[in-house]
């Protein structure tokens, strides 16, 4: 499927991002991944629309073949009846195939949209400097070293936040504010 190659690239990007501690580079990488997945979603929607058009045409051919067979039976034309049965069978098989294809495309689109939502959340967090968490943070399970590194980033972030709060309190005290 078209999404397999994209998913492999996104998994690699996310694995690379999990090794970086710079929030700016993480956000940039996630932005690139979001651009790619948005393009993939547009392609999936185009493919789904094409399948819908093809399915509608094939259903029309099926109806036409069935109608021709019925009309041929009414005038007792056995040769045309037999040909109509053959075509009805072929068109019915094609309609069933296209219906299955459409269902798979819908599943693939739903999956891609879910991935986009997860990446969007991770991107917003990265822009704010929040360490990545959840499924989009790391592709696969974390090794003990990676878990230790991730915890170190979380603690560094919390220490930076505490330092900012302390500096803010000192500035307020210096300026005589009681907010």
Image (cartoon, rainbow, N blue to C red):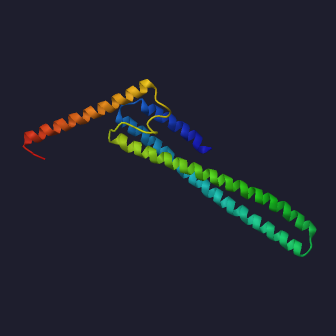
Q: Quadrant of residue 30?
A: top left
Q: Position of residue 130 (x, y in %)?
A: 34, 38
Q: Residue furthest top?
A: 145
Residue drawn at 30 percent across, 30 percent down: 156
Q: Inspect this view and state whether residue 38 appears.
A: no
The answer to whether 50 appears left or right of 10 in the picture is: right
Q: Quadrant of residue 145?
A: top left
Above or below 92: residue 151: above
Q: Position of residue 26 (x, y in %)?
A: 39, 36
Q: Inspect this view and state whether residue 3 appears.
A: yes
Residue drawn at 17 percent across, 36 percent down: 167
Numbered circles on residues, count: 0
The answer to whether 147 appears left or right of 93 in the picture is: left
The answer to whether 86 appears left or right of 161 in the picture is: right
Residue drawn at 35 percent across, 32 percent down: 22
Q: Position of residue 168 (x, y in %)?
A: 16, 39
The quarter of the picture where the N terminus appears is top right
Q: Quadrant of residue 86?
A: bottom right
Q: Residue furthest left?
A: 176
Q: Position of residue 159 (x, y in %)?
A: 26, 32
Q: Residue furthest bottom?
A: 75
The answer to whether 141 appears left or right of 83 in the picture is: left
């Amino acid at each position: 499927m078209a999404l397999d190659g994209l998913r492999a690239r996104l998994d690699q990007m996310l694995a690379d991002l999990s090794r970086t501690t710079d929030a700016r580079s993480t956000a940039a990488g996630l932005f690139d991944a979001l651009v790619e997945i948005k393009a993939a979603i547009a392609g999936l929607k185009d493919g789904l629309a094409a399948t819908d058009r093809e399915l509608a045409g094939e259903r029309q051919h099926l109806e036409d073949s069935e109608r021709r067979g019925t009309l041929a039976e009414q005038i007792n034309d056995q040769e045309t009846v037999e040909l109509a049965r053959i075509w009805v069978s072929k068109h019915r098989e094609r309609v069933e195939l296209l219906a299955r294809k459409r269902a798979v495309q819908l599943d693939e689109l739903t999956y891609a949209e879910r991935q986009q939502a997860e990446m969007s959340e991770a991107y917003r967090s990265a822009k704010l400097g929040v360490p990545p968490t959840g499924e989009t943070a790391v592709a696969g399970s974390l090794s003990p070293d990676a878990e230790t590194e991730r915890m170190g980033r979380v603690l560094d972030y919390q220490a930076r936040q505490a330092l900012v709060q302390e500096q803010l309190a000192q500035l307020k005290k210096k300026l005589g504010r009681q907010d």
